[in-house]
Structure formats: structure tokens, C-alpha cells
Amino acid sequence: MSETTAPVTRVASPAGPKGTTRGRGARISLRALQIVIALFYAFASALPKLIAHPSAVESFDTLGWGSAGMYTIGALELAGAIGLLIPALASVAAVSLSALMVGAFITQITAFDGEHAATPLILIVPLALIAWVRREDVTGLTKFVRREA
């Protein structure tokens, strides 16, 4: 080695066990956001539909979808909420719930004169963040599915 070349020393990466460059605080904040959004979908959105709360029944009767539509949407929201809590499914669940929110936005605009149309749009923002940040976790899910097939 010459005098002008310094030896290369490797510094331990602050990336953590998964090799990401996000800090610990960012990971904790993202996880907290996932939990809050999951709780919202499970209790404030899916539960009234699944227990046939009168307000949910009235809304779905107005749409003409009846109880079958109400239970289906409630079940999809509950599945999405559970998926947000499972790291390998969080990205897929966030994308799925975002698609559901696009449908909710269109429904609010067309059937309810835009009364609560901003709510689905607001919910898409944190869902998009979760989907983007957790996108790498889908590779583990893909490997698992391919191994099982």
C-alpha cells in the first residue's frame, strides 16, 4: 500500500437489521401510523357495517346495495385493517384500502352530493405512504407464495 492511499475501513451501517436507511424513529412512527389507521378501519368504519348500525344500513339502502353490499364492504375494510398490522401484507393492504377509498370517493360524489367526499381522499394519503415505504416487504410475500406453489 502506498503512503497516499489510506486503508478502507468499513463503518457499521445505521440501517438496522433489514438494511434500510430509515431511522428508528421513522420506523416507530410508521408502525404507529399503521396501527392508528388499522384501528380506524376496524372500529370506526368496518364495525358499524358488520353490526348493521342504523346509520350504515340507511346509507347502503340509499345506495341500493342492501345488507350484502354493507357486509361485503365491512369485511373488506376489516381485512385491510388486519393486513395493515402484518408487515408482509401492509403494502398490499394499503393499496387495497386505497382502491376502496377511490370507490368511496366516487360514491360520495355521485350518491351523496359530496357530503363527506374529503374523508376518503384524506385517508388515501397515509395509505399511500404506508404502501410506498412497506413495498419492499412484499418481496418476502412473493417468495413465500412462489415456494408454496
Image (cartoon, rainbow, N blue to C red):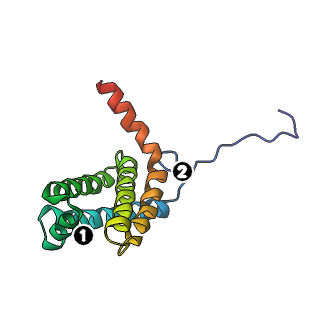
Name the one closer to the observer, 109 or 19: 109
The total number of labels drawn is 2
- Asked whether the beta carbons under mark 2 and mark 1 sit within 8 Å of each other, the answer is no
Asked whether, in this view, residue 95 is left or right of residue 72, the answer is right
For marks 2 and 1, give the CA distance: 36 Å
- Determine the residue positioned at 73% across, 40% down: 8
Name the one closer to the observer, 139 or 55: 55
Upstream in sequence: badge 2 or badge 1 = 2
Task: Return the x and y of residue 30 as percentages of the image width and height.
Answer: 43, 61
Task: Return the x and y of residue 88 as percentages of the image width and height.
Answer: 36, 44
- Determine the residue positioned at 30% across, 51% down: 83
- Badge 1 crowding class, 10 Å Cα cut-off, few under 14, some 14 to 19, many 20 or more, is few
Label 2: which secondary element: loop
- Determine the residue positioned at 15% across, 59% down: 66
- Determine the residue positioned at 16% across, 56% down: 71
**Which residue is identified by label 1?**
44
Task: Return the x and y of residue 106 as percentages of the image width and height.
Answer: 38, 61
Amino acid type at image mark 2: Ala
- Residue lying farthest bottom? 115
Residue 18 visible? The answer is yes
Amino acid type at image mark 1: Ala
**Which residue is identified by label 2?**
15
Q: Which mark is residue 61?
A: none
